[in-house]
Amino acid sequence: MSSDDLYPVTRLAAVREATARAGIGALLLTPGPDLRYVTGYEAHVLERLTCLVVPAEGDAFLMVPRLELAAAEHSPASRLGVEFVPWQETDDPYAQVARRLGPVAKVGLADRMWAMTSLRFRDALPGTEQVLAGSVLRDLRMRKSPAEAAALREAGAAIDAVHAQVPGFLRAGRTEREVGRDIADAIIAAGHETVDFVIVGSGPNGASPHHELSDRVIQAGEPVVVDIGGRMPSGYCSDSTRVYSVGEPPAEFAAYYDVLRRAQEAACAAVRPGATCESIDAAAREVIAEAGHGERFFHRTGHGIGLETHEDPYIVAGNAEPLAPGFAFSVEPGIYLAGAHGARIEDIVICTETGGERVNHRPRELVVV
Amino acid sequence: MSSDDLYPVTRLAAVREATARAGIGALLLTPGPDLRYVTGYEAHVLERLTCLVVPAEGDAFLMVPRLELAAAEHSPASRLGVEFVPWQETDDPYAQVARRLGPVAKVGLADRMWAMTSLRFRDALPGTEQVLAGSVLRDLRMRKSPAEAAALREAGAAIDAVHAQVPGFLRAGRTEREVGRDIADAIIAAGHETVDFVIVGSGPNGASPHHELSDRVIQAGEPVVVDIGGRMPSGYCSDSTRVYSVGEPPAEFAAYYDVLRRAQEAACAAVRPGATCESIDAAAREVIAEAGHGERFFHRTGHGIGLETHEDPYIVAGNAEPLAPGFAFSVEPGIYLAGAHGARIEDIVICTETGGERVNHRPRELVVV
């Protein structure tokens, strides 16, 4: 996919309009997903200030360290026709932004801006209220364009290709870390640019949802939770969980795995425009609670995904936001038996005009290897 | 190296005392190098709040998402004897921190805390001034302990082992990206946990200091700048630059490379306790300026290194901070001829009681391959 599809040059104008509508004087977008969304520029997060300044009125400009100038000029940001303002090592780029911007009542900071940067802006712009750029960008970022949906499908296919290889990596006697290393290699080989996380939770480790890798040796008869993801060259992320069992699992496990399977299906089936985020969470939770496992499902059902693995919308109780076409998020209920084993099934789902489209297609039945 | 050496449990008390001395009511340490320095805990940076709260008076506690609890309990943070406070998905952990902390005039935020987190703390603690935790931690973090110096030596040896292999990767006809892929593999094979950056700047790309990799085919007779680094399992970073030439380089290049070589030596030789950071920068800059290349060296001479690749102290004009034993930083002057080629030589240097100790030992002469 070309930058022009994924990061259209028209986006900057849409962002400026949304900024004005929100009553914000300017967005200050330092490197990270917000900057990449607006420009396509994947800049390093550094102590030296790189910042796209998007005033609600007037022209945007990119503050850029002198020695990043060539990289910026070769990046997709160069398509936008904004002025690049290089600063020298002994300049104060915060003061330069303040001078160029003039007085503003409110600025929107990139959601991931470091405190070392946001506090410099606070001091350089005294009396200016700081809010999150996300208050402007989230509505835009949540509604994936057709090109963004295609990028998520591409990421989904890549991580599916990794899951297809997992049975070949898993066997009794290997450690989680050994299996994890094979998976990480496969994530890159499948076309990802980075490995973002590799969770291999065998036996009791499967009961800790964010356990990653350990030197624990996988035993025969153990379920193994494999939750993996990475970032594609497009910038878009993959994230999918499947459960494998090295030989036949305990009967107790098989019973609740079946409940989990139905819960994940119910939540995916509930996806459609207008359904609230919390209703998707409830759809999964009800099935699990009815089967008496409510206490064993102690995390939200999902998170939005796009340029970040975790972004809006969150599929969680209390979030009454209605889904709209283009929203993309994980559906990943889990059931965990502390000290014994656990399970989680996860697909990325994109809300369509009429329902939900999953981008992950590996079998969701327990895979006995 | 064990956590007890690199991340001694006594550090928390030292941090608390420094916090009280600085007149700060509490540090709020979210995942990142500040949290790792104090606890050894390498937590993921996520939208869910993990935060070590270090009050100047009273007991520290770790706010931790319920589903990260097991990971936190298995981390080095569990050695510290601080209370772990798990929060559920529908709780407001910011309000919980505010309640437990009570009224405080000033809090210190982890330098890399995201704006989405710092603004939540601002709202949860109205009237509390936010400053950087770095104002307390920088003096501690800059003075590397013997265990930290050993970790930097280990990282230096690992990246030296990669540079030793670079001549085997470089030849005319290969692209920068192909060479970069070999280098990235070698960085991991040499014991790093992550590849942080791989710069292969051939010919004119060598004149852009932060150029990374491109599909440019390396030509015979071209100098190539190779600036590489990663993070070791200890948490400590490597960073070293050498210049190679694929066949004999242009005479003009060889002439300024010799100047650069002398400049880098002069700066390394100037390292000793009491010398200011800017004096180290000046030592390199003078040699280059005297030879008429002053305009071609347009970045600072170096940056501190430790748990971050770039941290205090910065070796830059205007920084009058005197060096002290344990300070560790890069010495990396460069000379760049736009459109033609460039060169940079970089070692990590640790200030000792009497001078400077380099942790990188690969030959600094131009390596003709």
Image (spheres, coloured by chain):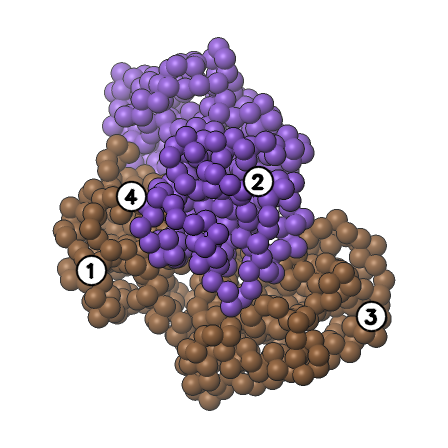
Chain colours: A brown, B purple
Looking at the rendered structure, whether the residues under marks 1 and 3 are on a common chain is answered as yes
Residue under the image location 35 percent in, 63 percent down: A134
Quadrant showing the N terminus of chain B: top right
The mark found on residue A25 in the picture is: 1
Q: Position of residue B294 (x, y in %)?
A: 26, 24
Residue position marked by numbered label 4 in the rendering: A120
Along the viewing direction, whichever of B178 and A161 lies nearer the viewer: A161
Cβ atoms under marks 4 and 2 closer than 8 Å: no
Residue position marked by numbered label 3 in the rendering: A249
Using the image, name the chain to which the residue with label 3 belongs: A
The mark found on residue B39 in the picture is: 2
Along the viewing direction, whichever of A285 and B299 lies nearer the viewer: A285
For the residue marked with disc 2, what is the amino acid?
Thr
- Give the Cα distance between marks 2 and 3: 38 Å
Using the image, name the chain to which the residue with label 1 belongs: A
Quarter occupied by residue B5: top right
Can you say whether B346 is above or below B39 in the image?
Answer: above
| Residue extending farthest top | B354
> What SS does tag 1 mark?
loop
For the residue marked with disc 4, what is the amino acid?
Arg
Query: In this view of the protein, can residue B358 be seen by the observer?
Result: yes
